[in-house]
Image (cartoon, helix red, strand yellow):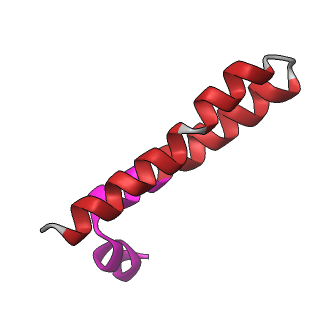
Amino acid sequence: MRDFIKGIGGLNLVMLLLVISIIVVSEIMFFRGNKLDAIFVGLWAPTILGFMIYLKKHR
């Protein structure tokens, strides 16, 4: 596990956990009937992933 965290980086691991939690929250909202809010929140995940890629390329 420590090798995985070293390879991926601590901050990237936290960001990936954040993305996973956003997806879960979005799905919960969708199945409870807040479809538009769920789509809005669900779009945060690819935005964060894109930001991570941008930061990784420009270090």
Residue located farthest toward the left when viewing the structure as drawn: 59
Q: Main secondary structure of the magenta part?
A: helix
Indicate the quadrant containing the N terminus: top left, top right, bottom left or bottom right: bottom left
**Residue 33 falls in image quadrant:** top right
Which of 17/23 is in front?
23
Indicate the quadrant containing the C terminus: top left, top right, bottom left or bottom right: bottom left
Q: Residue at x 87, y 28 (%)?
A: 31
Residue 55: give x, y in percent of width and height: 23, 60
Would you say residue 12 sits in the magenta stretch?
Answer: yes
Q: Residue at x 44, y 55 (%)?
A: 49
Residue 54: give x, y in percent of width and height: 28, 61
> Up-down: is 58 above or below 41?
below
Residue 27: give x, y in percent of width and height: 76, 36
**Residue 56 falls in image quadrant:** bottom left
How many numbered circles are shown?
0
Would you say residue 41 sits in the magenta stretch?
Answer: no
In the picture provided, is 6 more to the left or to the right than 48? left
In the picture provided, is 4 more to the left or to the right than 43? left
> Up-down: is 13 above or below 20?
below
Stretch of the chain drawn in magenta: 1-16
Which of 27/46 is in front?
46
